[in-house]
Image: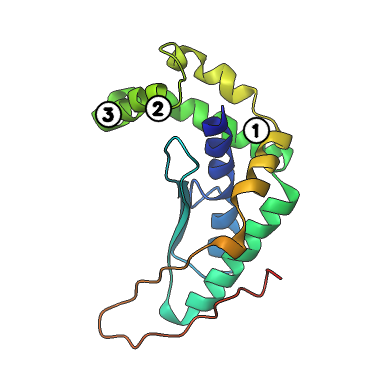
Amino acid sequence: RRVLFRSVLNQILGGDTLSSRLGKRIRDQLGLTYGINSAFVTGKLVGPFIVVMQTNPKDTEKAIDETLKEIDRFRMEGPTDVELTNAKRSLIYQFPLKFLDNDDLGDIILSQEEYGLGSDYPERFNSLVDKVDQAAVKRVAERVLDPKLFTKIIVQPKGEDPKPISSTPSSTP
């Protein structure tokens, strides 16, 4: 079930540039990115959580700092009722589409085996997602989203002089 908690968490936080918390805050409100999304690299153990954004080089440091602040805020507060409802609805509506693409179908089969979800996982998916609650998402966020442990990797256009980025975001102690 932890994989579902992470899926819901990610859908809320950065699963979609236009509707996620990161998209609304970093892209829409602050205008610091052209696009931003996140994902968990899955595996038997909790894999890395990644955030990818496209930003103007002059906004890089501020975009990273504000992203870390928003992740930390999510970690402390957890999701709202509306965010949770929308994320679960989105995951449930998207799930049948995964059976139309061989790569996605392969991921479902691999997940069934890797996480011990059982061969009836596709039939149980909707009810499993429906059972994810705010407390579970907040617990997972507290455990896996510690900005102090994040590593920053910055890719910039060829020929640009590297711009130093502070090693500690202002949002974390």
The kind of residue on which mark 1 rests is Thr
In-image side of 49 versus 25 (left or right): left
Which residue was labeled with disc 3?
101
Q: Secondary structure at mark 2?
A: helix
Q: CA distance from mark 1 to mark 2?
A: 27 Å
Residue 90 versus residue 168 in the image, above or below: above
State the mark number for residue 68.
none
Q: 113 or 68, which is in the foreground?
A: 113
Report the mark closest to the observer, 3 or 2. Answer: 2
In-image side of 49 versus 156 (left or right): right
Residue 78 versus residue 172 in the image, above or below: above
The kind of residue on which mark 3 rests is Asp
The kind of residue on which mark 2 rests is Glu
State the image quarter where residue 102 is shown. Answer: top left
Which one is earlier in the sequence, the residue at label 3 or at label 1?
A: 1
**Which image quadrant: the C terminus?**
bottom right
Q: CA distance from mark 3 to mark 1?
A: 26 Å
State the mark number for residue 114.
2
- Work out whether residue 88 can be spotted: yes
**Which image quadrant: the N terminus?**
top right
Neighbour tally class for label 2: few under 14, some 14-19, many 20 plus, Cα within 10 Å: few
- Which residue lies at the image location 37% right of the left edge and 25% below the top edge? 108
Where does the image place residue 18, in percent across and percent down from the top left?
Answer: 51, 51
Where does the image place residue 164, in percent across and percent down from the top left?
Answer: 46, 85
- Which residue lies at the image location 51% right of the left edge and 26% below the top edge? 92
Which residue was labeled with disc 1?
85
Which one is earlier in the sequence, the residue at label 1 or at label 2?
A: 1
Q: Secondary structure at mark 1?
A: helix
- Work out whether residue 29 can be spotted: no
